[in-house]
Amino acid sequence: MPGTAAISTDPFPVNGLLPKESTEALTFLRKYPNYDGRNIRVAILDTGVDPAALGLNSSGKVVDLIDCSGSGDVPLQPIQPEKDVESSGDQRTISFKSPFTDRTIKISSDIKNPSGQWKVGCKKAYDLWPDELVKRRTAERKAAFIVSHQALLCKSQSELLAFESSEKDKAKGSDSSKDTKENDNIKLKREELKAKVQALKDLESSYVDVGPIIEAIVFHDGKHWRALVGGGEGEARDSSLGQPDDFLRPMSTQVVDLTQCKALTDFRVERQWDTFGAQDMLTYSVNIVDDGAMLSLVSVAGSHGTHVAGIVGARHDEEPELNGVAPGCEIVSLKIGDSRLGSMEAGQALLRAAQAILDTGCHIANMSYGENGAFGVENKGAFAEALRDVVIRKRDVLFISSAGNAGPALSTVGQPGGTTSGVLSVGAYVNAGAMQKAEYALVEKGVQDSVTTWCSRGPCADGERGVSIYAPGAAITSVPKYIKQSSQLMNGTSMSSPNACGSIALLLSGMLDKGIPLNPHRVFKAIRATAKDVGDPLGVGFIRVDAAWDYIVDNQKRDDQDAEFRVAITPPGKPPGRAGSDKRGIYLREKAECYKVQQYNVAVQPTFKQHEGERAFALELRCALTSTQPWVKTPEFLLLGGNGRSFEVRVDPTLLPPGLHHASIEAYDTAQAGFKLFDIPVTIAKPEIPDSPTVRYSSRLESGKIERHFVSVPEGSTWASITIRSSNHSAPGTTARFWLHCVQMEKLKRLSDVEKAFVLSLSENEPVTKKFSVSAGTMEICSAQFWSSKAGFDLDLEIEFHGEIAGLF
């Protein structure tokens, strides 16, 4: 029976699948179609990129695939052929006996190997394959095992039953007195058949799937090292047919036929790939290093990196609406997600990736990866230092990174995105219209533009803004072939970062054509200066590609655009110039800071590269200083040269009410009206000082609203209980979906150690109580309605602190 609602006659909002209109990327491409990212090489630090994925499989798109994690490493050892040449029908082959598995490996005798030297290695597939593929194949292989197992069990049970029946018939028509030897033989046969049945039953309960074993033969063809790889799972096979015959044979009798395999060399040389088998559909390529001592099998550790690469630069000539943001760019995949660790990254992989960015000549890099670091160690660590001091400052690579998905509370940005100088940290935003319609299939209409609820927020513990820019935080685009579909929805800052990265690749393509210097300082200044105001409480804007291009062109002759304005803020009572105490912004949060005037020494130095002494010598900027809020006092003017200058700043939070307050110290060039040279963020999260152990808050949440309260936890408190109740739901009969996030910042502790996050779905007037540990200091209590929910509700919170505090009130 047809429905009563009218079926939409509007076309599917294809342009919302991978948003490019809201960022002005489409506007820019319509004006400058040749600035589509061409001649720009983009590094993707992630789980790896599948070069066979739809939109990434065109010639010249993926130009290098490198496994920085080492999870695909296969040590090689010399091997001699068991039989130099043998014939099988029309084919002549060379045979090897694997020293690892005892299987016979056959290759074509047509292989060119002038030295006659061969190497062999093997790898457990499950140590290399992504977890989701292992899970799928384990289930499929077990289903096949059960079919084969049940067939064998039924056969054995039938043999036992037939034997018992036969012996019973014989007993009826024969003399009961048999010789002892014959009776013993019958008994042994019966016991043997019973044991066989029992062994098969035990086998099912103790089933373990170790997965396929991959074998490789490596040789040098006189020009390149090459690898023949096989031993996967061959042709696709229905699990209902049971296991292939080879599975039931001893490995010493099995043959791994590599005669039809591609002889692959390093991917960057010929850009070839293959799959392990039709069952897994997992694409792999190779790199052979250390003069043939190590084979690196390069495959993905998950679908994430391919999706990220699709956002940056997928190319769909037959349907351009599906293109990535910069369809003309080249992709270099740097796999940092370790397949052995469930795609988690390790320090060694990150450092290898930093070096590979330089070795492969990348102009820009995207890292939609990270983790929460300890408060107070911003800008520290081997990887952060390698990025900041070498990749970015010395080699001018633009590094874009996701801010993290640990919000909605403040100071939840991850590393390296929100905490490392020189990195553009990107938060996730959802635009109303085509993006919401195409990606999210929302029931409620009229949901507003919004930062995603879970997007991490700044500032960093050292006062830096933490999030640099917002970009669309979702897309439906390319995923690896083993997923068994061509595209998929993913969301979060992992998706906003490559959207911004692709947008910037467009700008770099134009700058390269016009001869404008490519460096992060010039580009990131343009991105931030032209960002759209979206009403963010910390002043973070939304990326605008076309406006940023105009800014870059208009200011291309300004020398200061190539300088990094380094800021070092010395807190009260600390000597200036110390890396351990100097900050990158001003952030007041604790009770002792927020109830008295604070004085700071601010040092600003416009810094060029070491060999650009003449540019530093010639630079002289006559600055007008101002603050966006009256509670921050600055000097009126500042003459700024290559060696930098210091000045005093006073922050008076004493008359501010408890809550979040933000200001910006801004420096303008007096020679060019309205031209901002630098700014410094000032954030105050002033806590309420309760006069009793119980604190109550009431608010109304609707349209993705976020409420933040800051309370100074009473001295002696060790735990707290918080009771939540919703009422007056504007959509009767529905639940109130919201996020409750409580965070205390403790120096040298990770966010995960000091946060309490609850995702709640409450029926009307249904009270829920949560209990958790606390310590002295300021706690943010953040309640946030899901960005996708428009219907409002009233929310009441009651927080009660417990511990040795009774005598304090």
Image (spheres, rainbow, N blue to C red):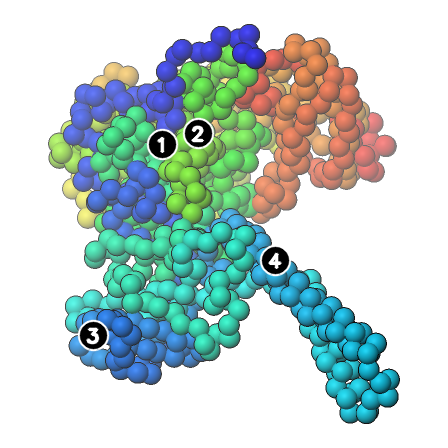
State if disc 1 and disc 2 touch (CB < 8 Å). yes
Q: Which amino acid lies under the numbered mark 1 shown in the image of this protein?
A: Asn
Image point 18% across, 25% down: which residue? 32
Q: Is residue 696 visible?
A: no
Label 1: how many Cα within 10 Å (few below 14, some 14–19, many 20+): many
**Residue that mark 2 sits on:** 473
Q: Earlier in the sequence, mark 2 or mark 1?
A: 2
Label 4: how many Cα within 10 Å (few below 14, some 14–19, many 20+): some
> From mark 4 to mark 2, how far is it between C-alphas?
43 Å
**Residue that mark 3 sits on:** 113
Q: Earlier in the sequence, mark 4 or mark 2?
A: 4
Quadrant into which the C terminus falls: top right
Q: How many numbered tags mark residues here?
A: 4
Name the residue furthest left.
514
Q: Earlier in the sequence, mark 1 or mark 3?
A: 3
Residue 662 against residue 517 in the figure, above or below = above
State if disc 3 and disc 1 touch (CB < 8 Å). no
**Residue that mark 4 sits on:** 146
**Residue that mark 1 sits on:** 499
Task: Give the camera-side residue of 640 and 287.
Answer: 287
State if disc 3 and disc 4 touch (CB < 8 Å). no
Label 3: how many Cα within 10 Å (few below 14, some 14–19, many 20+): some
Residue 275 against residue 766 in the figure, above or below = below
Q: Callout 2: helix, strand or loop?
A: loop
> From mark 2 to mark 3, how far is it between C-alphas?
50 Å
